[in-house]
Amino acid sequence: MDTTGVIIACKNDISHRIIAEQLKKHSIKRRYQAIVYGTFKVKEGTVEGAIGRSKTDRKKMAIVPDGKPAITHYRLIKNYTSSNGNNFAHIECELETGRTHQIRVHLASIGHPLLGDEVYGAAKNPFKLQGQTLHAEMFGFIHPKTGRYMEFHAPLPEYFKKLLINF
């Protein structure tokens, strides 16, 4: 929800089971682009933290000791300082695992919540956004019927591009 980009839909139960098995084995490749609060001093990094239901807010996910293992790799594309002096970064994320709200939880845990994320980030942001700045740029998997590797890409949406140009 509120994420743009590649969406994969299975047309039958067999395909669904095969894709679900690939997800379970972490063999599906997923790459996202995001705009987050703050700037990065390092060019790339990894966030590891088990994710499960928050103990204080059952509607949210959080890094918790008894959660499921989750690993997110990130790479800095560019740091920005907006005209009003706020700092943001445009980053790329690759998931090694796929937990509910994984990118949002992991980035917020290191002090870089997604711009526009009202659940894990700031309730207000200085821009008029229709959701969070998270874009599913690429999705790669083994096709359930042909057995061939397939990769799908989606270009950045216009609002995302305009935001980056206006920083």
Image (spheres, helix red, strand yellow):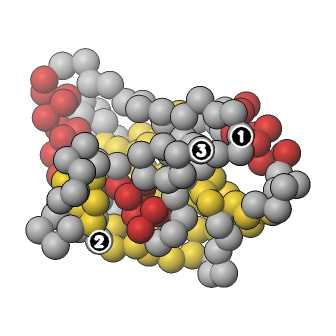
Q: Residues within 10 Å of mark 1 (few under 14, many from 20)?
A: few
Q: Is residue 56 left or right of residue 153?
A: left
Asked whether the residues under the numbered discs 2 and 3 touch, taking CB atoms below 8 Å apart as contact, a structural biologist would say: no
16, 64: nearer the viewer: 64
Q: Residue 75: horizontal and vertical position, in percent?
A: 58, 68
* Residue underneath mark 1: 127
Q: Residue 97: horizontal and vertical position, in percent?
A: 29, 59
Identity of the residue furthest to the bottom in this view: 42
* Residue underneath mark 3: 124
Q: Name above or below for residue 124 compared with residue 45.
A: above
* Residue underneath mark 2: 49
Name the kind of residue labelled 2 in the image. Gly
At mark 3, the secondary structure is: loop
Q: CA distance from mark 3 to mark 1?
A: 9 Å
Q: Residue 114: horizontal and vertical position, in percent?
A: 54, 52
Q: Residues within 10 Å of mark 2 (few under 14, many from 20)?
A: many
Q: CA distance from mark 1 to mark 2?
A: 30 Å
Asked whether the residues under the numbered discs 3 and 1 touch, taking CB atoms below 8 Å apart as contact, a structural biologist would say: no
Give the image quarter of residue 44: bottom right
Identity of the residue furthest to the right in this view: 83
Q: Is residue 62 left or right of residue 167?
A: left
Q: Is residue 163 left or right of residue 84?
A: left
Q: Name above or below for residue 136 compared with residue 72.
A: above
66, 69: nearer the viewer: 66
Q: Name above or below for residue 68 compared with residue 153.
A: below
Q: Residues within 10 Å of mark 3 (few under 14, many from 20)?
A: few
Q: Earlier in the sequence, mark 2 or mark 3?
A: 2
Name the kind of residue labelled 1 in the image. Phe
Of badges 2 and 3, nearer the viewer stands: 3
Quadrant including the N terminus? top left
Q: Residue 65: horizontal and vertical position, in percent?
A: 16, 73
Name the kind of residue labelled 3 in the image. Lys
